[in-house]
Structures are given as C-alpha cells and as structure tokens.
Image: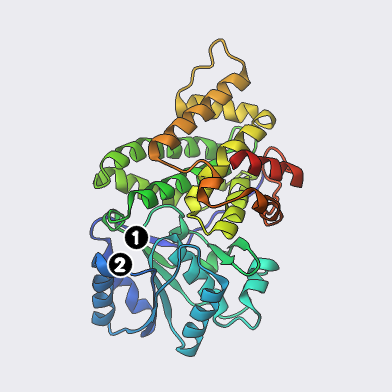
C-alpha cells in the first residue's frame, strides 16, 4: 500500500433482528428533545414508526416531527428542518428511513446553528462547520448509501439544478445506527435493486484507482462478490433474511471509509449520476447504473490492468488466449449481464433525461481527478450521449 493515511470511525452499530431494542441504550445519553426525521410515511404503514415512537416515549423524550424527507432531499427542505431543530433546541436528530433521511439529518445537524446559508457554505464553498453540531442517530430501513456509518450528505438544489454531496468529518457521523435487515423487506423491488447497485458502485468508485498492491482492493473484491451473490438470491426471494442481511452489512462497509484507505478513489460515476439526478430527480442508484458502463468503457484503456483484475477476480473471466483489454471488456460485459438480471435502468433517457439537457448536465458535473483519466468537458458530454 502506498501513501500515508489515518482511519477512525466513531459510529456504533447495532445489527440484527433485535437491533431496535438497543435504542433504549442510546437514548439516555442525550437530552429530552428529539427531532424525528422520516420520509413519505412508509414507516407508518409497516409499523416501524409506532415502534420507534413507543421507545422514545418510554424514555421520556419530547418528539418534534420532521417528516416528508424526499428521496433527493432539497435545500429548501434542509432549511425547514434546520429551523425546526433550532427553534426547539433539539438534543438529538433521529433519522428513521433510508440514506436520504440519514443524509438529510446530517445536513440539518450542521445547519441549525449555522450563521450562513447552509447550501452556500457546505455545498457551494465546501466549508466545514464552525458552529454547534446536533448529534445524529439512524434507524435504517433501506440498504444502499452507507450513510449510516459515514459523514456524507447529498443535497439537491432544484433552482440551481445541482445535486452535490459534502463528506463531513468524524464529528458529523452518526453517533449510532440501528440495522435490522427485516426493516428493508417492505421496500419495492425497484428500490431494493437501486440500493444494491449503489452499494456495488460505491465499491467500484474506490477500487478503480491506483495501481499498487493494495489490501483495500482485496477487501473490495470480496465485498463485490458478496453483493453479486446475495443480490441474485434477493431478487428471486426478497424475504430471504440471509441475503438481505449480507446486502445490508456490505452496504455499510462499502462506504464507511475503510476500503478507501491508501486509494485516490474515482467518484466520477457519482458526479455524472448526481448531475443527471439534479435534472430528472430520478432514483440515485438508477442514475448510477445508467452512466456506469459508458464511463467505464471509456476509461478502461487508461486502467486496463485493474479492469482485467476486476474481470478475473469478481466475474471469474479467464484471461487465457486473450489480450488484457479483451479480458477487461468481458468483465464489463459480465457486469452488464448482472445489471440486466437485477432489472436496473441502463439508459438515462429512460430516467427522463433528454438530448437538450445534456449540455446542462455536463455543466452540473463536477470533474474529479482521482481516477485513471481526468475528463474534459467534451468527454463528459460524449459519455452522457453514450448513456442516453
């Protein structure tokens, strides 16, 4: 492994069928006022809301509701939540939902006492918080983003047609997260598969960078194989607990910063996908799926050795009698076959993107330099055209 790095993750996890019981251990550590963050109301239909509220009340908590968090939480919603938190001087933000709820809660935690506009400060200027930060806890109901154990927070500004993520430091990471795989089983299959691809792509974004012999790559390959194996079980039987538990656990380790150690990381698929999402408001995992293959086929010649390794180690492609590039391309073909079996969307046009949006989407795409090729704006446009 090359380079120098540090690693610290302060989030405590409770995993398994009885994980919610441990909320009773965490709540006494915080004051009485809890801002309960959740989405469109599915947790009220499946009983999770009632279970959480019962535990909060049994611990003497005063609840301030903050529902209606959308799949791509907006800057306007963030300001609304920050006002609830500050006006009521809340002691804990408890996010009950998927990654969007967790992302949103972290954004609220650093925005409630911010003296500047939080969108401008954190998502335009990428500054760090210099104000009081409200602790966050998560009860996860969807596996995918890894937001339950990292500092990431993605917010969408519809007015500016931008969707931007800010990765905050240890002080913003959830203090605790509760992971019960059964909570994910009521999701529609399309949401489940979108989350599965989000997991896989998180791993890819870290894997496809660097060319040294790096322990992080061996970990990444094992995680990718686990996702592929469990996903094929889960799409046939969404209530298979073992498969769903493995998917949930892999999602957490895919993006809790462990496998990024010693890596430059890429993240261009996310930059492209988030820009598409800003224009279409499409499901995050689907936007990633739609831009991935055109992007990877474009950069493959610049990182052919790693793509060959990906083909061999993850997809069991033989390299015998083939060039490195042929082997690498077969790996991407195998990946595409798997994506089709999951029913993922492979074209941004199917998500609502149109040709007249491409220039704007390109303008909204942040260009990063951690991967095998730094894209020009023209190359971004060409990749988007190939994704259409």
Q: Are marks 2 and 1 in contact (CB under 8 Å)?
A: yes
Residue, x 54% and y 52% (percent of image)? 352
Whether residue 153 is visible, yes or no, is: yes
Tell me where residue 167 sits by quadrant: bottom right
Residue linked to disc 1: 141
Q: First in sequence, mark 2 or 1: give its number.
A: 2
Mark nearer the viewer, 2 or 1: 2
Can residue 255 be seen in the rendering of this structure? no
Task: Identify the residue position indicated by label 2 in the image.
Answer: 43
Mark-to-mark CA distance, 2 and 1: 8 Å
Secondary structure of the residue carrying tag 1 is loop
Q: Percent from the top left, x then y, of residue 163?
A: 60, 61
Residue 16 in percent (x, y) is at 27, 55
Name the quarter where the N terminus is drawn: top right
What number is the disc on residue 67?
Answer: none
Observer-nearest residue: 134 or 188? 188
Residue in front for this viewpoint, 173 or 270: 270
């Amino acid at each position: 492994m090359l380079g120098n790095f540090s690693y610290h993750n302060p989030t405590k996890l409770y995993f398994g069928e009885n994980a919610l019981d441990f909320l009773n251990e965490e709540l006494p550590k915080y004051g009485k006022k809890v801002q309960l963050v959740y989405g469109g109301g599915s947790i009220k239909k499946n009983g999770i809301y009632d279970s959480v509220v019962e535990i909060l009340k049994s611990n003497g908590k005063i609840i301030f509701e903050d529902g209606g968090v959308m799949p791509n939480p907006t800057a306007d919603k963030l300001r609304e939540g920050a006002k609830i938190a500050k006006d009521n001087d809340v002691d804990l933000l408890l996010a009950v939902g998927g990654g969007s709820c967790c992302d949103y809660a972290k954004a609220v935690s650093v925005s409630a006492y911010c003296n500047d506009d939080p969108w401008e400060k954190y998502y335009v200027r990428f500054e760090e918080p210099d104000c009081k930060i409200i602790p966050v806890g998560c009860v996860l109901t969807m596996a995918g983003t890894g937001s339950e154990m990292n500092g990431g927070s993605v917010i969408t500004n519809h007015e500016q047609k931008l969707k931007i993520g800010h990765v905050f430091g240890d002080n913003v990471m959830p203090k605790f997260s509760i992971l019960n795989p059964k909570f994910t089983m009521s999701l529609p299959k399309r949401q489940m598969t979108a989350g599965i691809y989000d997991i896989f792509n998180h791993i890819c974004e870290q894997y496809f960078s660097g060319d040294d012999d790096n322990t992080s790559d061996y970990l990444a390959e094992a995680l990718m194989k686990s996702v592929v194996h469990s996903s094929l079980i889960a799409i046939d039987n969404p209530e298979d607990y073992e498969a769903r538990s493995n998917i949930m656990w892999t999602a957490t380790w895919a993006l809790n910063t462990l496998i990024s150690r010693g890596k430059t990381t890429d993240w261009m698929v996310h930059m492209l996908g988030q820009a598409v999402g800003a224009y279409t408001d499409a499901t995050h995992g689907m936007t990633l799926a739609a831009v991935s293959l055109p992007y990877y086929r474009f950069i493959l010649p610049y990182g052919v050795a790693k793509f060959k390794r990906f083909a061999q180690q993850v997809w069991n492609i033989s390299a015998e009698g083939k060039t490195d590039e042929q082997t690498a391309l077969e790996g991407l073909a195998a990946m595409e076959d798997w994506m089709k079996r999951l029913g993922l969307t492979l074209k941004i046009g199917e998500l609502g993107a149109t040709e007249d949006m491409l220039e704007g989407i390109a303008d909204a795409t942040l260009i990063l330099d951690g991967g095998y090729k730094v894209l020009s704006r023209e190359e971004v446009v060409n990749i988007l055209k190939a994704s259409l």
